[in-house]
Amino acid sequence: MADIQRDVQAVLDELVSSGAERGVQAAVHRGGELLVDAVAGVADPATGRPMTPDTPVFVTSTGKGVTATVVHVLAERGVLDYPTRIADLWPEFAAHGKDRATVADALTHAVGVPGLPADITPDAFLDWDAMCALVAGARPWWEPGTATGYHAQTFGWIVGEIVRRASGRRISEVLRDEVAGPLGVAGELFLGVPAAQLPRLARLEDPPPAPAGPGFAMPSPPGAQEGWVWAPPAVLPTAEYGNRADLLTTDVPAGGTMTARAVSRMYAALLHDVDGVRLVGPQRLRAVTAVAVSGPDAVLGNPASWGLGYAVGGPGPFDGPTVFGMAGSGGTAAYADTATGLSVAVTKNRTTFGDFTTYGAVCAAVLKHV
């Protein structure tokens, strides 16, 4: 499969040489085999340190697919189950009528707590217990389970605390012990990053200024809790946010830090046996990747189709009802296809908000060969 590696490498080289990207990684697995492990550019624009295949990158919401995978691995082991009420694990979460919200509702962004106080700052994210108490005590914007609306930040604390209450371990520990460690990528797949690993990380940069647009400034729906917004301005996922060492080392599992080849390998191990490791069985894979909730997003207004923690259908040409995964606001993405057994991941350190041109170009090169 040298041709597919060559063609993806050529795409990355062109993106970097044109100035569209600074540093970028791409990885592809099929049938548990690594077909592509390509990289181009620099990890740190200030020092010129090169991007390498083992350079972890903060990937914002692409990490949600990793968070969801932790839940499914625990479910496979009987530690938790999707119909379980969150309040049965976490009694405080029952406040303001959220008592019937389930683990499945959390995974499908249906709990009804998609926002945070408008004046919240990143420093608040450093206190896990305080953030969980804030979210648990929130008034839902809609009756849990009756709508879906993207929980951009709160997804992490809701799902992460479910994991902690059910397993007795922090979600980053479960990821290491049950997913990354067995797959041999414990040094490349993180939620909270160990402090000793920080010097290896890529440094993010924002793109050149673009014309003013709506960006994240969108109105909250009518049921929003007073003083809360979907996207508090101080915690938008800019490069400054994604380069903060204190945030990177803290569990904020609505995002994650990883290499392309590590997250592609994780998706491969959902689909297949990878060097003796398969994360979930075929029956569970079918259940969690099927559409569980679909309809208009109650916050963003766009059509949404969710499996249990994964978006169904991907950006760009790697798309369809059998494709599942997650994309990050900065243009990163990782998806897999149950029909073809293919997984594709792209990470990069230039934050092109909502622009998946690079991921689409990589997918187009890959699909010529499969």
Image (tube, rainbow, N blue to C red):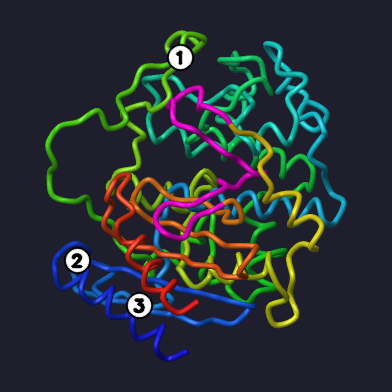
Circle 1 Cα neighbour tier, 10 Å, few/some/many (<14 / 14–19 / ≥20): some
* Position in image of residue 117 (x %, y %): 44, 19
Q: Nearer the viewer, residue 114 or 295?
A: 295
Q: Find numbered disc 3 in the image and state the secondary structure of the residue it sits on.
A: helix
Earlier-in-chain disc, 3 versus 2:
3
Of badges 1 and 3, nearer the viewer stands 3
Q: CA distance from mark 1 to mark 3?
A: 42 Å
Judged from this view, the residue extending furthest toward the bottom is 2
Q: CA distance from mark 1 to mark 2?
A: 40 Å
Q: Find numbered disc 1 in the image and state the secondary structure of the residue it sits on.
A: loop
* Position in image of residue 46 (x %, y %): 17, 65
Residue at 75% across, 80% down: 276
Q: Amino acid at mark 2?
A: Pro
Range of residues picked out in magenta: 295-320
Q: Which residue is mark 3?
A: 8
> Total label count?
3
Residue at 48% across, 39% down: 126
* Position in image of residue 29 (x %, y %): 55, 75
Q: CA distance from mark 3 to mark 2?
A: 23 Å
Q: Nearer the viewer, residue 213 or 174?
A: 213
Residue at 51% across, 61% down: 194
Circle 2 Cα neighbour tier, 10 Å, few/some/many (<14 / 14–19 / ≥20): some
Which mark, residue 221?
1
Which mark, residue 45?
2
Q: Nearer the viewer, residue 272 or 22?
A: 272
Q: Amino acid at mark 3?
A: Val
**Above or below — where is 286 with respect to 120?**
below
- Are the residues at dot 3 and dot 2 in contact (C-beta closer than 8 Å)? no
